[in-house]
Image: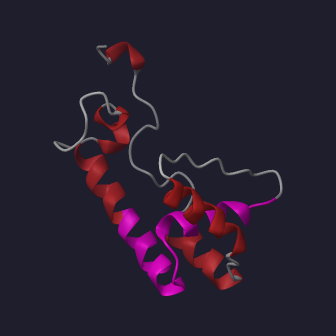
Amino acid sequence: MDDLAPDDYRRYSPRFQGENFNKNLQLVERVKKIATQKGVTPSQLAIAWLLAQGDDIVPIPGTKRRAYLEENVAAVDITLTQAELESIDAIAPKKIAAGDRYPDMSSVNR
């Protein structure tokens, strides 16, 4: 956390605090393993997974660099098998992320 800018939202996000941060890093490592096995980046895997959830789901990834934009767009060409989808769902079921998604804004000093 020390390498984050003072105004980085992750400094205030419950998911990046204490034990929540450690638990969520373990989840990231499991996702990285599946991505490596598939030959894609973790971001591409996440976007491909979202695209596989149905036509009513539209991922909107943010990026600051063209290379990452191109990487994200390439996820459209990734097809996940049923076994891969089940594997992702098994290691990262809904609501597994530790900590609240957003901080209590009344406790954030700005």
Q: Say how the picture is coloured.
A: secondary structure
- Residue 107 falls left or right of residue 81: left
Q: Is residue 72 above or below residue 85?
A: above
Q: Nearer the viewer, residue 17 or 68?
A: 68
Q: Residue at x 40, y 28 (%)?
A: 103
Q: Residue at x 70, y 67 (%)?
A: 76
Q: How many marks?
A: 0
- Give percent across and percent down for residue 4: 24, 40
- Residue 105 falls left or right of residue 83: left
Image quadrant containing the N terminus:
top left
Q: Residue furthest right?
A: 55
Q: Nearer the viewer, residue 30 or 36?
A: 36
- Residue 16 falls left or right of residue 53: left
Q: Quadrant of residue 93?
A: bottom right
Q: Residue furthest front?
A: 66
Which secondary structure class fits the magenta region best?
A: helix
Residue 92 visible in the snapshot: no
Q: Is residue 6 above or below residue 19?
A: above
- Give percent across and percent down for residue 24: 36, 56
Image quadrant containing the C terminus:
top left
Q: Residue furthest left?
A: 2
Residue 106 visible in the snapshot: yes
- Give percent across and percent down for residue 70: 59, 62
Q: Nearer the viewer, residue 26 or 49?
A: 49
Q: Is residue 79 above or below residue 107?
A: below
Q: Is residue 18 above or below residue 94?
A: above
- Residue 90 falls left or right of residue 25: right
Please tell me whether residue 33 belongs to the stretch shown in magenta: yes
Q: Residue at x 65, y 84 (%)?
A: 83
Q: Which residues are magenta?
A: 27-54
- Give percent across and percent down for residue 21: 29, 50
